[in-house]
Image (spheres, rainbow, N blue to C red):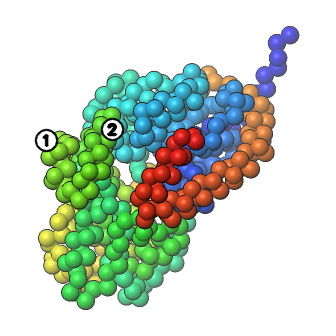
Amino acid sequence: MAPTVYRLDMDRLSILVLHCLGNPALAPAFLNHHVFALQRNFPENDYLYHDATLPLPDYVVEQDFDAIVLDVTFLTARWASLEFLQARKAAYDFVRESAAVKIAFPQDEYDCNVLLDDWMCEWNVDVVFSVIASGWDVLYPRYHVQGNIRLGYTGYIDESLIDRPTKPFNQRKIDIGYRAKKLPPYFGRVGQAKWTIGRDVARFARDTGLNVDIELGDQGTLFGDAWLKFIDDSKFTLGANSGSSLLDPTGEIQRHVRAYLTTNPDATFEEVEAACFAGQEGLYSFTAISPRVLEAALLDSAQILVDGEYSGIVKPGEHFIAIREDASNFEEVRAAMSDTSEVIKMIARCRETILSVDSLRYRNKAKMTLELIGDLAARKNLSPNRLRTRDTISRYMLEMPVKYKSCWSRQQFRARVARAVAPYPLLNQILRSTAKILS
């Protein structure tokens, strides 16, 4: 006698989300929102969120789902060694064989784009959401022919910020606020501009009397509410496009740059370029609006942005004060900053424009994703056993939290040790070597 297949709540989708966020309590707010957008906005569906830091239980592998979502944090595996990428793909090979709807949300697609392109093709991914608005034929030489590419964004509007009280402009203590990591040269001049603009503005502003709070590097990184309070206390937020002006198909440029900097740690960008990617800088420009632009707009902080496209959403003069990549027009920027009445109008225009873009809302992104899954699942005539799916999710939620807690504790311990030994290179090298042997 054939087993009974229960088909309940056919409008209720079952979705497996694969990510590698790490401890959600320590992750940036925009990444938390990005990873859990579906569940937070439409909790009525059946979701199983799995962090690939831990092995996926066999009973989940054996479960059918309507859809499998590959989050940006899961797809960063291509940036590690080729061995790591192959291990990740082998561990999740069931995705390749699954009939479920498969949707991917990559970012920084110019970094190891051929590895990503091959991955999407091998796993027969149905839809890829690219954060780069153009050049899909370059970024996805194979997938753009056989797959479906749609536009996405690096970040979306945090609905909790819309009604969050903000400080009046004149009560903010910081004239220009900025935080940025010093990106390595393999992101090209576009990547360099994210930190050099901070360096140059700080230099130009040194004797102007402006209260400038600019920190470059990991030591100045702010998370969660501390980051939002920093923006809320800044009259002007400095910024630049996300992206790169280099295409690194397999990570070879990155590996070459890292090796070169190991023996030439004080090399200039120009020296690294000549040694590692001569003639390749600037052949492409892959840029996108960053979550920081959205946050600053919603927190009523005026923006000074390196002149660029910003996904075609905000425009210089109308929504932000444009500054050249080398900050050489800083005096013009200062003059624009001093016109407070116009600045306040610009702040209002920027906020209004950001809020008017429906596709920037997390809820709309989630709604569109679920509608897409429902449509494709219907076309594929998928019918997972709903009761079994819920049993699988219940078992996972019962067994896995203690494993996650243990994993996050180990990660925090390793991070504390790494920070403690960082000033001692020899000890740091010994510990890393020992860790590799033990693993």
Q: Which residue is mark 1?
A: 279
Q: x and y percent of residue 20 in the render?
A: 55, 45
Q: Along the horizontal axis of the image, is 380 left or right of 403?
A: left
Res 134 visible: no
Residue nearest the observer in this picture, 118 or 85 = 85
In primary-sequence order, the first of circles 1 and 2 is 2
Alpha-carbon span between mark 1 and mark 2: 17 Å
Task: Judge whether 230 appears above or below 10 on screen.
Answer: below
Task: Judge whether 104 appears above or below 169 on screen.
Answer: above
Res 357 visible: yes
Q: Along the horizontal axis of the image, is 7 left or right of 297?
A: right
Crowding at dot 1, Cα within 10 Å, few <14 / some 14-19 / many 20+, comes out as few
Q: Secondary structure at mark 2?
A: loop
Residue at position x 79%, y 26% from top? Answer: 6
What amino acid is labelled 2 in the image? Gly
Count of numbered circles on the image: 2
Residue nearest the observer in this picture, 380 or 110 = 110
Q: Along the horizontal axis of the image, is 327 left or right of 423?
A: left
Q: Which residue is mark 2?
A: 251
Crowding at dot 2, Cα within 10 Å, few <14 / some 14-19 / many 20+, comes out as many
Task: Judge whether 290 appears above or below 170 on screen.
Answer: above
Q: Secondary structure at mark 1?
A: loop
